[in-house]
Image: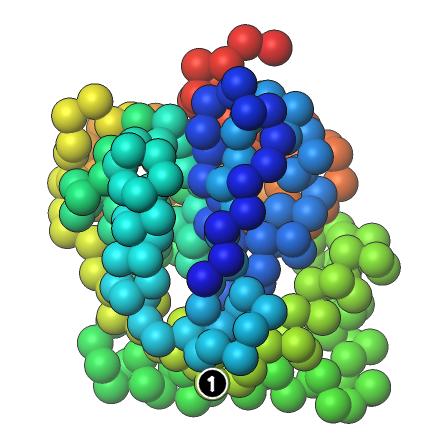
C-alpha cells in the first residue's frame, strides 16, 4: 500500500481513493494540482497498484489497511474522503464500519454494484479480459483509445495514460479487485452521526444509480451533473471545474 501526503498542510485532510485498475496519479491526475492548493491530500494506491510486486488481496483487507493508516497517522479522523468509482466502495465501508470517522464522505458518480459469488465470478471472467486484452494488440488499442476519447471527451494524452494503467498492472490484481468489489456489500440506510454523505450524480449513467444512492445512505447530499461516469476526472474543465466547486461546498471550504 502507498500513502502519499501532499498539498496544503494547513488545509483540511482529504483522502483520494482511485477506481478500478487505476493509481491515484492517473485517476486524479487532472485535478490533483487544484485540490492540492486547498487541501492536505492523502493519496492512496492499493496493494497491486502501488508499483511493487504485491497483489491486490480483497476489498476488506485493503479497507483495514486504510483504517490502520488513518488511526496511526491521523488519530482516526479524516475531514473528507473522495472515492472514484470503485474507490467509493472504500468510502462507504469506512463510513459504515465506524472504525475511523470521516466528516465528509464524497462519492464520485459510482455504480456501487453488488452481486452474489457466481455472478461476480462470471462478470470478472468477462470484463477483466476486456480491460487487459487490448494492451497486446495495436489495432484493439487504437479502437479502445477512440472509445475512451468519445465517451469521456478525453484528449489523446489522458486516454493513453488511462490505458497505461491496464497495461502496467497485474491481471490478477485487476481480477481480484473487480471480483471482490462486487462482493463487498453496503447496508441499507447507513447513517453515522456527524458524518455527511455527498454524491456526485452523473445523470447520463441513469436514474437507477440515483435510487441506489438513496437506498444505501440516509438523506445523502446529491448534486446532479450532465455527464458520464467520472467524466469530471477524465474530461475537460467544463466537467472538472463545476465539480471541484461543489467539493469545496461539501468540505465547507471557502473560495
Observer-nearest of 36 and 241 = 36
Asked whether residue 214 is in view, the answer is: no
Asked if residue 155 lies left or right of residue 14, the reply is right
Q: Residue 243, how many percent across, how many down?
A: 58, 30
| Residue 88 visible within the image | yes
- Residue at which label 1 appears: 172
Extreme residue toward the front, this view = 72
Instruction: Please say if 113 is above or below 125.
Output: above
Question: Residue at the spot x=53%, y=29% of the render?
Answer: 40
Where is residue 54 drawn, in percent x and y? Answer: 47, 77
The mark tally for this picture is 1
The quadrant in which residue 159 appears is bottom right
Q: In this view, does 146 lie to the left or right of 93?
A: right
Split into 4 quadrants, where in the image is the N terminus? bottom left
Q: Which residue lies furthest to the top in this view?
A: 254
Taking the image as shown, residue 3 lies to the left or right of residue 237, namely left
Residue nearer the viewer, 30 or 75: 75
User: 232 left or right of 43?
Assistant: right
Question: Which of the 4 image quadrants contains residue 163?
Answer: bottom right
Q: Picture coordinates of residue 97 (x, y %)? A: 17, 47
Amino acid at each position: 500500500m502507498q500513502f502519499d501526503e501532499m498539498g496544503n498542510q494547513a488545509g483540511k485532510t482529504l483522502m483520494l481513493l482511485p477506481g478500478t485498475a487505476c493509481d491515484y496519479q492517473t485517476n486524479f491526475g487532472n485535478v490533483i494540482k487544484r485540490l492540492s492548493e486547498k487541501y492536505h491530500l492523502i493519496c492512496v494506491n492499493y496493494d497491486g497498484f502501488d508499483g511493487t510486486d504485491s497483489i491486490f488481496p480483497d476489498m476488506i483487507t485493503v479497507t483495514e489497511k486504510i483504517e490502520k493508516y488513518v488511526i496511526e497517522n491521523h488519530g482516526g479522523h479524516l475531514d473528507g474522503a473522495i472515492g472514484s468509482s470503485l474507490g467509493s466502495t472504500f468510502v462507504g465501508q469506512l463510513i459504515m464500519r465506524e472504525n475511523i470517522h470521516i466528516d465528509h464522505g464524497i462519492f464520485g458518480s459510482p455504480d456501487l454494484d453488488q452481486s452474489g459469488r457466481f455472478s461476480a465470478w462470471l462478470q470478472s471472467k468477462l470484463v477483466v479480459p476486456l480491460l487487459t486484452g487490448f494492451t497486446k494488440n495495436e489495432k484493439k488499442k487504437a479502437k479502445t483509445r477512440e472509445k475512451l476519447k468519445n465517451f469521456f471527451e478525453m484528449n489523446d494524452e489522458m486516454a493513453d495514460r488511462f490505458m497505461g494503467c491496464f497495461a502496467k498492472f497485474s491481471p490478477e490484481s485487476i481480477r481480484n479487485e473487480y471480483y471482490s468489489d462486487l462482493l463487498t456489500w453496503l447496508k441499507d440506510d447507513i447513517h453515522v452521526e456527524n458524518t455527511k454523505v455527498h454524491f456526485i450524480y452523473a445523470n447520463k449513467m441513469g436514474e437507477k444509480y440515483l435510487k441506489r444512492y438513496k437506498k444505501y445512505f440516509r438523506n445523502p447530499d446529491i448534486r446532479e451533473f450532465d455527464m458520464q461516469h467520472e467524466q469530471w476526472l477524465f474530461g475537460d474543465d467544463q466537467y472538472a471545474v463545476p465539480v471541484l466547486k461543489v467539493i469545496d461546498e461539501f468540505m465547507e471550504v471557502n473560495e
